[in-house]
Image (cartoon, rainbow, N blue to C red):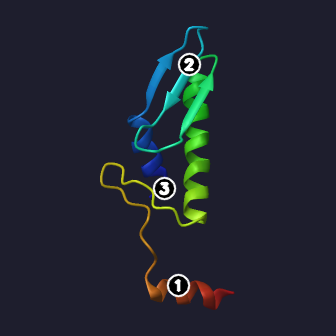
Amino acid sequence: MISGYIDRALKHAVYDKLEDGSFSGRIPKCKGVIAFAKTLKKCEEELRSVLEDWILVGLAFGHKLPKIDNIDINKKPSKASHYESLAAV
């Protein structure tokens, strides 16, 4: 589910060529997800990495992440699966 979210979010990425010839990339729906690099390819790679970290931090701190193309990764596990994971501990 998270890999699908990442792929869909990256389809909404906006890239700009800067005055110095480098690139910036951002995902407007994902506030704070921005990257800079000397080439477009490197910028795309960096943006993916920033997005992955942004998701992990957001989930860890319980932030509400935006739905991307009807993919909602904010859903909480059911109580049954929560208890199952606790039983494994």
Q: Say if mark 1 contacts mark 2, CB within 8 Å.
A: no
- Residue type at numbered disc 2: Phe
Tell me the quarter of the image containing the N terminus: bottom left
Residue 70 percent across, percent down from the top left: 30, 54
Pointer 2 residue? 23
Label 3, residues with CA under 10 Å away: few <14, some 14-19, many ≥20? few
- Give whichever of discs 1 and 2 has the lower sequence position: 2
Give the residue furthest to the top.
20
Q: Amino acid at mark 3?
A: Ile
Identify the residue at the far left of this view: 70
Residue 58 locus on image (x, y percent): 56, 58
Label 1's element? helix
Q: Quadrant of residue 27?
A: top left
Quarter of the image containing the C terminus?
bottom right
Q: Nearer the viewer, residue 40 or 87?
A: 40
At a point 53% along the width and 42% down the height, the residue shown is 32
Q: Which residue is mark 3?
A: 2
* Mark sitting earlier along the chain (3/2): 3
* Residue 51 on image: x %, y %: 55, 44
Q: Residue shown at 35%/56% (left/top)?
A: 71
- Measured in 3D between alpha carbons, the distance from the residue under mark 3 to the one under mark 2, in whole angstroms, is 26 Å
Q: Residues within 10 Å of mark 2 (few under 14, many from 20)?
A: many
In this picture, residue 80 sits left or right of residue 50? left
- What's the distance in space between the residues labelled 1 and 2, CA to CA? 43 Å
Circle 2 sits in a helix, a strand or a loop, which is it? strand
Compared to 76, does 40 lie above or below?
A: above
Asked where in the image residue 9 lies, by quadrant, the reply is top left
Q: Check residue 82 in the rendering and tell me which mark sits there, or answer none.
A: 1
Q: Which type of secondary structure does the marked residue at label 3 adopt?
A: helix
Circles 3 and 1 in contact, beta carbons < 8 Å: no
Which amino acid, by three-letter code, is at mark 1?
His
